[in-house]
Amino acid sequence: MRLSDDVLRRLTDLAERRGVSVSSTIERLLDEALRRDAHPGITFRDGAGGRRAGLVGGPDVDEVVRTLRVVQEERPADVVATVAEMTSLTEGQVGTAVAYYADHRDEIDARIAAHERAVDEAEAAWRRRQEVLAGPRR
């Protein structure tokens, strides 16, 4: 693959800032471009939990899917419309998140599991602090 000097320089700078190789940077960017092409309305963003898929101008895909699962448990007549109303998204945006999830289930399920672990850990830490604040048991 031949790249212009300018593109190669920018790739090298990006790779150095992220502490990864140029090759892995190219692979990540190409993979994300292909995913965006297959799923218009999806973008990728960095955060404390790593790089993740999200709706352009909206929440992360895993957040939409978590809401979808809650709604599915309640069994409303129109799941997509209910999720859209609950999240202030359009039905099209919910559909975009669902389509991405359908094609990348393992990735999104892993993010949901990590989120659930973090919530459980935060609750356990809060409970420990409450025990300390309550004082010694008698």
Image (spheres, grey):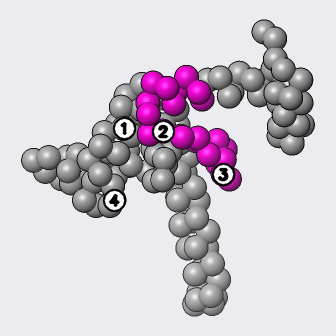
Q: Residues within 10 Å of mark 2 (few under 14, many from 20)?
A: many
Where residue 10 sits, quadrant-wise, is: top right
Residue plotted at (58% across, 73% down) = 126
Residue 59, magenta (yes or no)? no
* Marked residue nearer the N-terminal end (3 or 2): 2
Q: Position of residue 58 (x, y in %)?
A: 45, 53
What quarter of the picture does the C terminus occupy?
bottom right
Q: Check disc 3 and give the amino acid type.
A: Gly
| Residues at marks 1 and 4, CA–CA distance in whole angstroms | 14 Å
Between circles 1 and 4, the one closer to the viewer is: 1
Q: Could you say which is closer to the camera, residue 109 or residue 120?
A: 109
The first of marks 2 and 1 along the sequence is 2
Helix, strand or loop for disc 1: helix
Q: Which residue is mark 4?
A: 87
- Give amino acid for label 4: Thr
What's the magenta region?
Answer: 32-53
- 112 with respect to 76 (left or right): right
- In the rendered structure, the answer to whether residue 82 lies left or right of residue 40 reads left
Q: Which mark is residue 42?
A: 2
Pointer 1: what residue? Answer: 96
